[in-house]
Every structure is written in C-alpha cells, then in structure tokens.
Image (cartoon, rainbow, N blue to C red):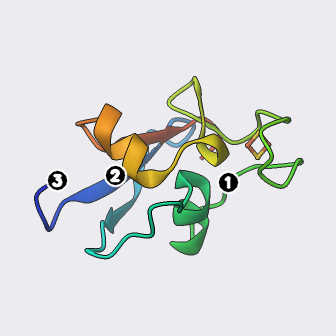
Amino acid sequence: MWPLSQSITVIGLASQKIVKIIPIPDNLPEDLSLMNFLIENGITVASSCGGVGVCKKCLINHTVSSCQITLLEFIDINPSLQVQISYL
Ligand code: FES
C-alpha cells in the first residue's frame, strides 16, 4: 500500500511541463488501468486499439503500455509516481 494523499504527477515531455498532479483516491478499483485512470482525470492518452495492447500508442515512461498495467501495479513499480508522456 501507499501513504494516503500521494499523487500521480503527469509530465509532458514535449512541453517540458507538469501537465497535472492527480491525487490517488483511497478506494481504487483493483482492475483500473493506468490509461483509464489518466483519461478519467482529463489526460489525453493516444490509442488506436481501444486499450487491447496492440497499438503501443499509449506508452508512458518510454516503455510501459498504460492500457496493460493497472494503476495499483504502476504504483508498486514506480515509487516516483511520475507518468511521462512524450506528446504532451
Ligand atoms: S491503447 Fe493500444 S496498446 Fe495501449
């Protein structure tokens, strides 16, 4: 688990700016993908496959398909809680 009141920081690599800081809610659905979490919080995530893991347009942090990882998994493997998106 993570301390309450932590946030995901979305960084745009094209703009070199922090796009948004999104608080992590207490009651996360275990199956919520990182991609859907970002979209639900107003972040544009590129996709042409609708989140089935084929197009690789939803890459964050250069290597992670955001549709293929849950937010909880992302939190576990990324202590910095930073999401870098190349085209933002
Ligand atoms: S949306 Fe196509 S691979 Fe993630």
Residue 2 circle label? 3
Discs 3, 2 touching: Cβ within 8 Å:
no
Q: Nearer the viewer, mark 1 or mark 3?
A: 3
**Quarter occupied by residue 75:** top left
Question: Is ligand 1 within 8 Å of the beta carbon of the residue shown at mark 2?
Answer: no
Q: Is residue 28 above or below residue 10?
A: below
**Would you name the residue on which mark 1 appears?**
45
Q: Residues within 10 Å of mark 2 (few under 14, many from 20)?
A: some
- Name which residue type carries label 3: Trp
Q: Residues within 10 Å of mark 1 (few under 14, many from 20)?
A: some
Q: How many marks?
A: 3
Question: Residue most toward the right?
Answer: 48
> Which residue corresponds to the image point at 80% horizontal and 46% vertical from the top-left?
52
Q: Residues within 10 Å of mark 3 (few under 14, many from 20)?
A: few
**Would you name the residue on which mark 2 appears?**
9
Question: Is ligand 1 within 8 Å of the beta carbon of the residue shown at mark 1?
Answer: yes
On the image, the x and y values in percent for residue 25 come to 30, 73
Q: Nearer the viewer, mark 3 or mark 2?
A: 3
